[in-house]
Each structure stands twice: as C-alpha cells, then as structure tokens.
Amino acid sequence: MYFDHRNTTFEVKAGKPEIALVPIGATERYGDHLPVGATTLILDAVSRRVAEELEETAYLLPTMPAGTSGLHLGRGG
C-alpha cells in the first residue's frame, strides 16, 4: 500500500516514503468524443498503478489538472 492524502501525518512519518509522485495532467480539447480532462483522468489511473507497484516507498500527491491551449478557444469539447 502506498501513502497519499488520505494518510495521517503520523502514518506518513512512521512509513517514511522515499519518493513523491506528482502527477500533472493536461486540460485541453481532444474532440467531441472525449472529456476535456481525458489526460488528467488517464494520468490519475496510471499514477495510482505506479504507486501500487512502489508500495510503501511512494507518496502519491493528488493529480493536478493544468494547461492552457489558445488553439482550441471557441471550440466545444
């Protein structure tokens, strides 16, 4: 089991994770068939799988959606 924002300070201090995972996903248009946060949703799932593989050595921070894409202004999706 990995550590994340659901753990208490005491649990994290006792576990002493060695690495922090900082997932940052894009928020942009991929067309009408995908949600705007598709990259963030996929990255969230992938980062959880990586943290599960690393077990107690990892602290998984919440996935942060980020991005700006002026190219897509005025378009839906």
Image (cartoon, rainbow, N blue to C red):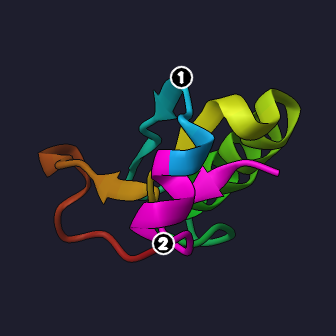
Q: Position of residue 38 (x, y in %)?
A: 59, 60
Quadrant assignment, res 62:
bottom left
Which residue corresponds to the image point at 64% horizontal and 67% vertical from the top-left?
Answer: 34
Q: Residues within 10 Å of mark 2 (few under 14, many from 20)?
A: few
* Separation of marks 1 and 2 at Cα, in angstroms: 17 Å
Q: Is residue 46 above or below residue 40?
A: above
Task: List the residue tagged with mark 2.
Answer: 8
Q: Position of residue 27 (x, y in %)?
A: 36, 57
Give the residues in magenta: 1-13
Task: List the residue tagged with mark 1.
Answer: 18
Can residue 28 be seen from the camera position used here?
no
How many labels sit on residues?
2
Q: Is residue 15 above or below residue 50?
A: below
Secondary structure of the residue carrying numbered label 2: loop
Residue at the far top: name it.
18
Q: Is 4 covered by the magenta stretch?
A: yes
Q: Position of residue 16 (x, y in %)?
A: 53, 35
Which residue corresponds to the image point at 50% horizontal and 34% vertical from the top-left?
Answer: 21
Could you tell me the amino acid type at mark 2?
Thr
Q: Is residue 37 above or below residue 70?
A: below
Drawn side of residue 30 relative to residue 52, left or right? left
